[in-house]
Amino acid sequence: MRIVLLGAPGSGKGTQAKKLMADKNIPQVSTGDMLREAVATGTRFGLKAKSIMEAGNLVPDDVVLGIISERLGQPDAQEGFILDGFPRTTQQALDLEELLDEMGTPLDTAVLMDVDFDILMKRLTGRRTCSLTGKLLNVYFSSQAELDECTDAGGELVQREDDNEETIGNRLSVYRENTEPLIEFYKKREKLTTIDAEGAIDEVYTRLRESLQ
Ligand code: AP5
Ligand code: MG
């Protein structure tokens, strides 16, 4: 199964990709996570990406394409993958199409995760990641038991650098301007499926699974 999860920041791409990855045994390929790793490692390229990401702008297409083509060539991606946060521009979508054509493995579906813009702000300002397990949590939406599970084990609830209101505002407008056109792009290719991504995480996951049957 080769799918793209398309959706605004905070629509739940990472949350749902992780569930699907565990169920289907195919990797989640998140350009955001890979870029954050490069930043944390402090490579020269990582240092360049840091300020772009902190401002909520997009890293150049050729850089992201390089990361993706290397990742999709790895053995664990041969049976399929879940792309999370890529493509994000029409150029990236065209590049992906060309890359998958060359590999002889076309994309099955692009799933648009539809969430109202007001809900996104709350999801993003409330997001925390457990420093021990990497689990995505939310101070507004996760249960106290889930949050305690991390802190009781000695973990910290870490907030992403770009999850402040100002940067979130820019990320949402960058999404509208650069990424929303991909809805039409995949519609034209008859590859678009839209799911209602509001409501409880498990309910959204059920809808996602049904949309992939
Ligand atoms: P990236 O890491 O991809 O961030 P994003 O697109 O802004 O998306 P998010 O990760 O913020 O949201 P998500 O949809 O994964 O939601 P999540 O599941 O975490 O990109 C970061 C930056 O990297 C970009 O700004 C750019 O600079 C750069 N970059 C990355 N890819 C690039 C590319 N291709 N080209 C150029 N630059 C690129 O959920 C959010 C929160 O909500 C969590 O707390 C979660 O617990 C909660 N939640 C999820 N679902 C629910 C639900 N159903 N109910 C209640 N809470 C929920
Ligand atoms: Mg994410």
Image (cartoon, grey):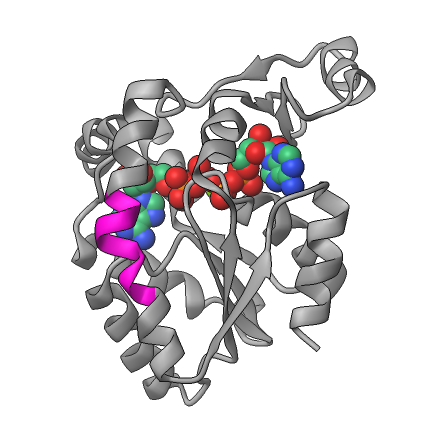
Residue at point 75%, 50% (across, down): 203
Q: Closest to the observer: 185 or 127?
A: 185
Q: Main secondary structure of the magenta part?
A: helix
Q: Which of 173/96 is in front?
A: 173
Q: Where is residue 7? Give x, y as percent.
A: 44, 52
Identify which residue is drawn at 60% across, 50% down: 197
Q: In the image, what residue occupies the spot 19% across and 34% down?
A: 44
For the record, the magenta segment spans: 174-182
- Nearer the observer, 33 or 4: 4
* Horizontal arrangement in the rendering, residue 200 relative to residue 183 (left or right): right
Q: Is residue 170 above or below residue 30?
A: above
Q: Using the image, determine if residue 1 lies above or below residue 30.
A: below
Residue 68 highlighted magenta (yes or no): no
The quadrant the C terminus occupies is bottom right
Q: Is residue 75 visible?
A: no
**Outermost residue toward the right?**
145
User: Which of 60 and 74 lies nearest the eye of the viewer?
Assistant: 60
Image position, residue 209 (x, y; %):
71, 65
Q: Position of residue 108 (x, y in %)?
A: 52, 80
Does residue 211 show up? yes
**Quarter residue 45 falls in:** top left
Q: Which image quarter: residue 71?
A: bottom left
State left or right for residue 157 relative to residue 160.
right
> Please, which residue is most extreme toward the bottom here?
104
Q: Is residue 167 above or below residue 158?
A: below
Kindly identify the residue that appears in the image at 32 percent across and 86 percent down. Answer: 102
Position of the N terminus, as image quadrant, is bottom right
Left or right of 90 on screen, residue 205: right
